[in-house]
Image: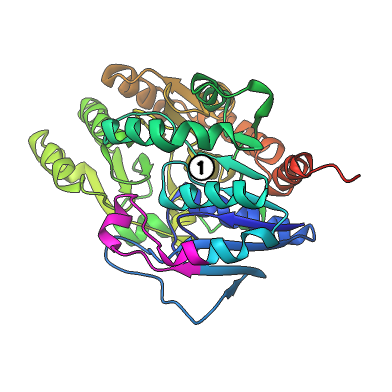
Amino acid sequence: MKVLLVSATFPPRQFGGMTASSHMLAKHLVKRGHKVTVYTTDIRDRQSRIPRAKGAQKVDRIEVHYFRNISNWLASQRLYSPLGMITAIRKELGNFDVIHLNEYRSLPSIIVHYYAQKYNVPYVLQAHGSLARVMSKQRLKKIFDSIWGYRLLQDAARLIALTPMEAEQYQSFGVDKAKIETVPNGIDLAEFEKLPPRGKFRKKYGVAPDQKMVLYLARLHKIKGPDLLVRAFASIASRLKDARLVIVGPDEGYLPALKKLVKELDIERNIHFIGPLHGKEKLEAYVDADVYVLPSIYETFPIAAIEASACGIPVILTEYCGAAGMIDGQAGLVVSYDTNQLSDAILRMLSNEKMRQQFAERGKALVREKFNWAKIAEQVENIYLNCLPVKQ
């Protein structure tokens, strides 16, 4: 099949669940013999762009076209504006067998919808957790849905949900249940076969070998709940004086407020702000942690929790994380979005080595069984095949 995958972000951008999942899906579809073309934008981060060569570039045998955003700052706010993509979609869309949209509320999605209808090319839409009108821009999201969103969902040949929770969200938008397929994100197991030795991260960033290390690895954004984690950690810091909270991830405007909170709680000596880490350095952080914590207000599918499990690190999530049902009792603990419940869970985990070891082993087995990209790509391939028109 000739597949067009439309994703707002793509490597060499190094952070974000949609970036990673778009890349891994395309990579494994190519391995399965399909010709995959990616249309994406040039945003790398808030300050920089991906350099664009003339024409397509090759990334892991994938043909990738990077289109310039009018404003890099707007793109960092998830308001993507790759106007050059309009011309490419208008000219080339009819040459593809199927389109995979990895975005919901965006200009590329509006453009793809229009020309997919015009050229009668089926498209699969994967919202990646963007359906819910939570946190910011709620009124703008409602306006988008009224003008474009509902039609975008209704006209899709199939809709991919990451979790049962997201499948229910699609249905709340009036989508026929029969069109919804639930397929989780995954990880490339090859990246976790040979993990770095324990101790490198701690030595580099000043965490002693005998100190308990709580790891937060995610975007520094209110929706991820880092403030709840800081408050929960503060309540146990006096009881576990050797505990350290390591905060890893790119700042999305929330770092100053977080540092102010840490100072107010007088736990500055217990907190390490690291910034974003990628590749081998990220694995070193996972390996050296005693527990990984993601206390999100809303989260469809926390890929970092799956990565931590692959490294043999137990996980604590809030109940608002879409993967909570799969993680709870298997790879770790799930708690309410509550300071006391979170601090109790962290304390239990850090104080019970046997519990940590059990969750570590179960978590690694769960990842191998449920979150293998080779299996996931096969599932998605079958979804594409079911979208194609029946040949007479």
Residue 293 showing in the rendered view:
yes
Q: Residue at x 33, y 21 (%)?
A: 337
Q: Where does the image place residue 274, in percent across and percent down from the top left? A: 29, 55
Q: Quadrant of the C terminus?
A: top right
Q: Which residue is mark 1?
A: 303
Q: Residue at x 67, y 45 (%)?
A: 122
Q: Residue at x 36, y 42 (%)?
A: 216
Report the front residue among 277 and 233: 277
Whether residue 280 appears in this view of the structure is no
Quadrant location, the N terminus: bottom right
275 shown above or below 331:
below
Q: Which residues are magenta?
A: 66-87
Q: Nearer the viewer, residue 295 or 75?
A: 75
Question: Residue reaching furthest left?
Answer: 264
**Location of residue 373 with respect to 88 vertically, above or below:** above
172 vs 227, left or right, is: right
Q: Nearer the viewer, residue 258 or 118?
A: 118
Going 35% across and 69% down the picture, which residue do you hit? 49
User: Percent x, y for residue 271?
Assistant: 23, 44
Q: Is residue 372 magenta?
A: no
Closer to the camera, 350 or 145? Answer: 145
Q: Say above or below: 299 vs 69.
A: above
What residue type is disc 1 on? Ile
Q: How is the image coloured?
A: rainbow
**Position in image of residue 103 (x %, y %):** 48, 45
In the figure, is residue 142 to the left or right of 6? left
Residue 15 appears in which quarter of the rendering?
bottom left
Left or right: residue 359 compared with residue 231? right
- Secondary structure beneath dot 1 equals helix
Residue at the farthest right position:
392
